[in-house]
Every structure is written in C-alpha cells, then in structure tokens.
Image (cartoon, rainbow, N blue to C red):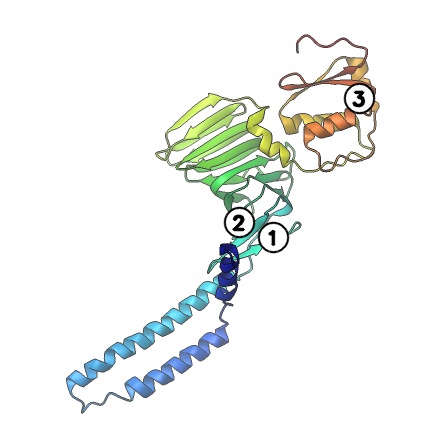
C-alpha cells in the first residue's frame, strides 16, 4: 500500500457523520445518569472531606466529556449545513479537479454543473472555470484555494484567479475579491489577482478595479500591474493587456457556440478574450465580416486556435501582429503598421 492509499484509507475511516439532536440528547442523559450513580450517589455528607475531594476530578471529567461530545457534534453539524446564496455554477475543471473542503479533514469532489454557494471553501487542483450568476465568469488557476463569502464576494487564500465580467452583465459592480491586502471590486472588468507568499498582485486588463484597504481606497485602471506587500505598501507599473501574462486565463475561456453566428461577433469575442485590438482593414472588408455566418463548432480550442480555424474557412486574410488581430481581403498587401 503506498502513501496515497494509506491516506485514503485513513480519510475514509475518520469520516464521522454529524450527531443529530436526538443523539446528543441521549449522550447527555447517559452521562448525567452515570455521573449521578458514580459521583453524586457516591458522595455522602458523613464522608470525610478528603474522600469528597477524590470524587471531584471524576465529576469534572464527566462534564468535560459531555461538553467535548457536544462540541464535536456541533462542529460536524456545521459542516453539513446547507450553504448560502449561490455565487456561480462549476462550468469546467481540468484534472485533478476541484474539491470542497469540509470540517474534520473531509473533502468532496465537485462535478461540472454543481452550484457554488456562500460558505463553501474550495481547493482548486486543476484549472477551473466558474460561470457567475448574472453574467461573466471566474477562472481559478491550479493549486489555488478560495472561500465563497457571499453571492457577490470570494476570498482568495492562495494561488491566482481571473475575473471576467463584461460590460452590461447583470452581475453588479459590488462583486468583490478579498485578500490579505484588502478588497478588490470590479468596475466592468477583466483582472487577475494573485496571492504570492505575503504579497498580493493585481493586474487589470480591462475597465478598472477599486482597491479598498485600511488606509482608504483607490482605483487601478486597465494596463496597470500593482504589487502590494504585507504592510500594504504598493507599487504600480504598466503592463500589456495582451501576451504571456494572460495565457493561463485564456486557456480557461468559456466555450463559444459559432453555429449560424455572425463572424463579426466572433471576432469581437476573440479580441476581448486575448486583449488584442481588432483591426478591420477597410469598409469593404467590414461589410464582408458583417455578412458572413459561421458553421460548425470550435469547442476544445483556445481563442486564437479557434480564430485560425474559423478564418481558414473564409476568403478573408488574417494577420496577428503584436497586440492586434487584423482582417482584410486576401488580395490586399500585408499591413506595414497598425
């Protein structure tokens, strides 16, 4: 038996169901009866004072045992209470998946489609995509841990996450991520937040983020990276909104249905998912892009892979200069600059 098998056996055998109120009542009654028989009934007024003192530790032990049992029952019961308001739905999780962390070292694997609610603690072991109620999504990197505070807030305890709430989504501006560095509230945003040792790193890709900490609040705009140390000292620097910094989040993008959808709509989606600027070379190309309807599917492909597959089925020319997506007629000469 290897270490993993031993750990699984121990976990399975240590799982204890929550004690019901009836069970707790029976334990309390039995303990009280035993105490009365062996302690209360065993102490008489005519006994020497020293004999009475010998019974006191047993009485205290019985009381402590009862309290301990009641405490364990309450602790386990709290772990089985129905979680609160829904935050999201688990859309996709890469192996080895995501588990809910429960009291008493218990874990429960979550499957796609599961509701994520306030009160849950989640260990994300493979890249995971959550579809937020009201629109947008939350992407969590492997080896991360989050706690769902409410229907509008999560706490990032370790690792990294990416918030994607497009303009017009019903999810309100109160959606917030908490770390040891304070609160980060989205303002029509794409942003990544990471907890690295005792520091927090914020990268804003689109829109802006409101940062609130003990010293006050400030706004961090798109194209900014901010590092916050354990003493809440911060340093801001510019960051590109396209490129390798965002690659992990792009791999977790929601799948998009293209069947009979306009090419123009798809191009806008890819541009936003990759942080690239969409450039249509001229009005004739723009009219063509608006006319084309797509067919098939691009499930399982990352945004740029899907873009190349779709564009290969059209008569249009695709170019991917740094930070941009350029579409033109195939007969047009390559762009020199954007």
Q: In which quarter of the image is residue 173?
A: top right
Q: Earlier in the sequence, mark 3 or mark 1?
A: 1
What residue did someone put label 1 on? 110
Answer yes or no: do the residues labelled 2 and 1 have beta carbons within 8 Å?
yes
Q: Can residue 76 be seen in this view?
A: yes
State whether residue 44 is above or below residue 22. below
Q: Residue 289 carries which label?
A: 3
Q: What element carries label 1?
A: loop
What residue did someone put label 2 on? 122
Q: Where is residue 214 in the image (x, y as percent from the top left)?
A: 38, 36
Q: In which quarter of the image is the C terminus?
A: top right
For the residue pair 71 and 87, the one nearer the viewer reads as 71
Q: What element carries label 3?
A: helix
Q: Is residue 206 visible?
A: no
Q: In this view, does 57 lie to the left or right of 289?
A: left
What is the C-alpha distance between the residues marked 3 and 1?
Answer: 41 Å
Q: Nearer the viewer, mark 3 or mark 1?
A: 1
The local crowd at label 2, few if under 14, some if 14 to 19, many if 20 or more residues have their Cα within 10 Å, is many
Residue visible at 16% across and 84% down? Answer: 49
Q: Earlier in the sequence, mark 2 or mark 3?
A: 2
Q: In which quarter of the image is residue 212?
A: top left
């Amino acid at each position: 038996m290897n270490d993993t098998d031993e750990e699984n056996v121990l976990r399975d055998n240590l799982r204890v169901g929550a004690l019901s109120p009836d069970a707790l009542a029976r334990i309390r009654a039995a303990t009280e009866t035993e105490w009365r028989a062996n302690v209360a009934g065993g102490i008489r007024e005519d006994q020497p004072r020293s004999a009475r003192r010998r019974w006191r530790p047993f009485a205290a032990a019985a009381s402590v045992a009862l309290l301990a049992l009641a405490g364990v029952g309450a602790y386990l019961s709290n772990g089985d209470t129905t979680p609160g308001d829904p935050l999201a739905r688990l859309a996709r999780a890469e192996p080895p998946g995501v588990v809910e962390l429960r009291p008493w070292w218990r874990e429960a694997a979550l499957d796609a489609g599961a509701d994520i609610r306030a009160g849950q603690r989640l260990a994300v072991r493979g890249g995971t995509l959550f579809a937020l109620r009201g629109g947008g999504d939350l992407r969590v990197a492997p080896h991360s841990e989050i706690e769902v505070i409410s229907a509008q807030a999560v706490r990032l305890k370790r690792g990294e996450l990416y918030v994607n709430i497009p303009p017009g989504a019903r999810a309100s501006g109160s959606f917030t991520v908490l770390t040891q560095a304070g609160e980060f509230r989205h303002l029509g945003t794409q942003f990544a937040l990471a907890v690295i040792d005792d520091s927090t790193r914020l990268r804003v890709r689109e829109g802006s983020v409101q940062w609130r900490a003990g010293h006050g609040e400030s706004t961090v705009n798109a194209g900014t990276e901010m590092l916050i140390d354990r003493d809440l000292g911060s340093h801001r620097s510019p960051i590109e909104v396209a490129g390798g910094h965002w690659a992990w989040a792009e791999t977790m993008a929601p799948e998009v249905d293209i069947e009979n959808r306009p090419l123009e709509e798809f191009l806008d989606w890819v541009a936003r998912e990759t942080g690239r600027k969409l450039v249509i070379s001229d009005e004739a190309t723009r009219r063509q892009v608006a006319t084309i309807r797509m067919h098939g599917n691009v499930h399982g492909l990352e945004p740029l892979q899907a873009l190349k597959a779709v564009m290969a089925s059209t008569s249009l020319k695709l170019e991917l200069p740094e930070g941009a997506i350029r579409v033109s007629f195939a007969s047009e000469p390559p762009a020199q600059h954007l």
